Each structure stands twice: as structure tokens, then as C-alpha cells.
Amino acid sequence: MTAVSVMRLLPTLVMPDPEWPASPAPIAAHGAAEDAFSDDEENVRLMLRIRDGDVAAFERLVELHQHMVIGTACRMLGNQEDAHDIAQQVFLRIWKSAPRYEPTAKFTTWLFTILRNLVFNETRRRSRRKEVPLEPEEDDQAPRQYADHTAPAADQLTQQDELEQALDKAIAALPEKQRLAVVLRRHEELPYEQICEILDMSLPAVKSLLFRARTELRKHLASYLGEEA
């Protein structure tokens, strides 16, 4: 199957939903570990079939991970159209790399590393063109998560919405590595060790990165948290 044929498949990637489905569970110390290994085993099985040219396996892999990829790209770039383009590039690279694929690392680590490179290239391209990163779009498909309320009052819902918008804006203003670390930790709930691999940083460096990011976010959200800036 040629790259052109693959590109015909990729426009079927869905646009992100208001609430993002959870990514494959990170490897944990207790009962969740078995499920995490099962998820990765399924990804590896699909990749080995894709390595042999199995188009149906590729379609299934896209189906499993497209929301996660588009959601992360959208949070990084603040623009759904750009996120959609990046997602197409991610899956196209996976297809092209499949003949050389060897399951030496967790699949989602490899997936996010490809995504990291493409997103960072895009943010640097914008920087060279002196483009200001766009804020997350204000529509029903914006990558935002809301707390679970039971018949919330209108003012509570408004406050929650305002806080989520302010948080999205604050995250968008972070340097690219801090922003990606926050997105991977907060939205995808990845363990520190996996974030280290994706960012190619040591554990102390990642923890320091997240500490600086959270400090900056707290400054931006001081008025919402009832704190002094």
C-alpha cells in the first residue's frame, strides 16, 4: 500500500470530542499493570500485522489512538485544523516506519515521541514566522474536560467553564516542553517514567520541568484560586 493510499484513509480521522477518551492505562504498581500490558500487547500485535502490509490493522490502530493524538496536538497547538494535519502526519509516519518496526519500547511512548517531534517542529516554524500561538478554539469541540456535577447550578457551571478556559490559556502560554509535560501528565495521565522517555529527559529534570510549569500556571490562575498573584 502506497503513502498516497494511506493518505486517502487518514482524512477519515474524526475531529476531537468535547470530552477526551482515556489513553491506554499507564503501567502501574498494582492491578492496573496487567491491563496496561494487555493494551500494549494489542498495539504490538497490530503493528506486526501492519509491518506485513495489513491495512485493516492500520485502520484499527488509527481508530484506537486518533482521539488521543488529535487531542494532544490540539492542546499543544491551540488549533484543531493544525492538530488534524499533525495527526495525519503521525499515522503516515507510523505506516512508513512499519516495515522496520521492532517492539523494543511501549507503543504509546513511540507514538508520543513521533507526535512530540512534529508538534515541536510546528511550534518552531510558527516562531520563525513570528506567529502567536492560537488560544484553544471556543466551540463545542474544544479539548476541554469538565468536572462531574450532579444538577449543577448555572453559576457553578459558568465558573467551571471560565476556570477551564483560563487553564487552557495558561497551558498554551507555557514553553513547549513544559506544555507537553503538563498535557501528558494532566490529560493523558502518563507516569513520570514514560514522560521522561518521550521528552528524552531524566526523571529529576521532568519533575523540575513540571514543578516550574505548575508554578507558572498557579500564577496565571491566582484570581480563580483566591490567591494573590
Image (spheres, rainbow, N blue to C red):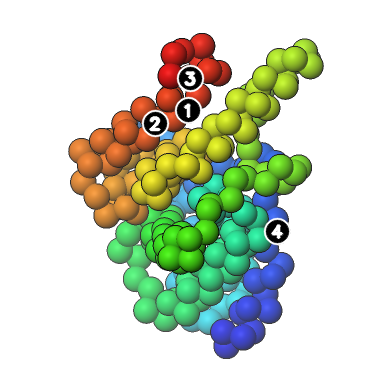
**SS at mark 2?**
helix
- Whether the residues at callouts 1 and 3 have beta carbons within 8 Å, the answer is yes
The amino acid sitting under disc 2 is Glu
Per the rendering, the mark at residue 216 is 2
- Check disc 1 and report the residue beneath it: 220
Tag 2–tag 3 contact (CB < 8 Å): no
Q: Quadrant of the C terminus?
A: top left
Q: Secondary structure at mark 3?
A: helix
- Identity of the amino acid at label 3? Ala
Mark 4 vs mark 2, foreground winner is: 2
Question: x and y percent of residue 165 in the render?
Answer: 62, 33
Q: Secondary structure at mark 4?
A: loop
Residue toward you, 52 or 65: 65
**Mark 1: few/some/many CA within 10 Å (<14, 14-19, 20+):** some
Residue type, numbered disc 1: His
Mark identifier at residue 222: 3
Determine contact: label 2, label 1, CB under 8 Å: yes
Q: Is residue 51 visible?
A: no
Residue kind at label 4, given as amino acid type: Val
Which comes before the other along the chain, label 4 or label 1? 4
Image: 182 above or below 10: above
Disc 3 residue crowd, few under 14, some 14–19, many 20+, Cα 10 Å: few
Q: Residue at x 42, y 42 (%)?
A: 174
The residue identified by callout 4 is: 14
Mark closer to the chain start, 2 or 3: 2
Task: For marks 2 and 3, give the CA distance.
Answer: 10 Å
Q: Are marks 4 and 2 in contact (CB under 8 Å)?
A: no
Per the model, the C-alpha gap separating discs 1 and 3 is: 6 Å
Q: Nearer the viewer, residue 82 or 135?
A: 135
Q: Residue 115: x and y, percent?
A: 46, 60
